Image: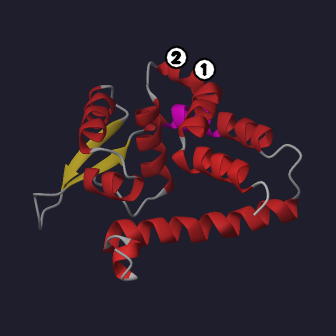
Amino acid sequence: MEGSEELDDSLDLLLNGQVYKKFQEHFCSVVLKKYNLNMVDVRVLLFLYEHKRFDTAKDIVSERYLTKSYVSKSLEKLIDRGFLSTKHMKNDRRYIHLIIEEEALPIIQAVHTQRQKMMRALFQGVTEEQTAVLGDIATKLSRNISAVLRDGCFEQEQGKL
């Protein structure tokens, strides 16, 4: 396929996520500096805020594929600074549920504002139709990646190894 090497490189960069992470850090740097946070801290806060049914450290690790050590350090910092609090459930004290405190809301709002700017820059020159197609493809790729990570190697399942 003509141009496939260029597509492979572009797709690899996109899926690898390093370029996007740098792009995201660029837009969030004002918030990170103001509140003395890092991107893991912001990702943890946003995840808890945007996904109310997920409220444990284990949820963050499994749903966002962040390492346990990064999540643990981030949670410790966010709790110490009053942005999160914890609650043990009466019926199962092993699980510690995380609660976003009001002190975290200005951070979340500031990140949402920066995210809107970031998305405008990211999708500049991209039509609504192209955005919809990208959304469909991203959903399918994400499902495929999750299935392989959950169930094992795709090639093993296909009998190719």
Q: Is residue 5 above or below residue 104?
A: below
Magenta segment boundaries in residue numbering = 105-112
Q: Is residue 1 above or below residue 77?
A: below
Residues tagged 2 and 1 counted as in contact (Cβ below 8 A): yes
* Badge 2: residue crowd in 10 Å (few <14, some 14–19, many ≥20): few
Quadrant of the drawing holding the C terminus = bottom left
| Location of residue 103 (image quadrant) | top left
Q: Position of residue 48 (x, y in %)?
A: 42, 50
Residue nearest the observer in this picture, 157 or 107:
157
Query: In the rendered structure, does residue 106 fall within the stretch colored magenta?
Result: yes
Q: Which residue is mark 1?
A: 30
Q: Which residue is mark 2?
A: 33
- Tag 1: amino acid: Val
Residue nearest the observer in this picture, 2 or 37:
2
Look at the numbered disc 1 and give the secondary structure of its residue.
Answer: helix
Q: Residue at x 44, y 18 (%)?
A: 36
Q: Position of residue 87 (x, y in %)?
A: 22, 50
Left or right: residue 153 compared with residue 47: left
Q: Position of residue 89 (x, y in %)?
A: 17, 60
* Badge 1: residue crowd in 10 Å (few <14, some 14–19, many ≥20): some
Q: Residue at x 27, y 27 (%)?
A: 80
- Tag 2: amino acid: Lys
Left or right: residue 33 compared with residue 158: right
Q: CA distance from mark 2 to mark 1?
A: 5 Å
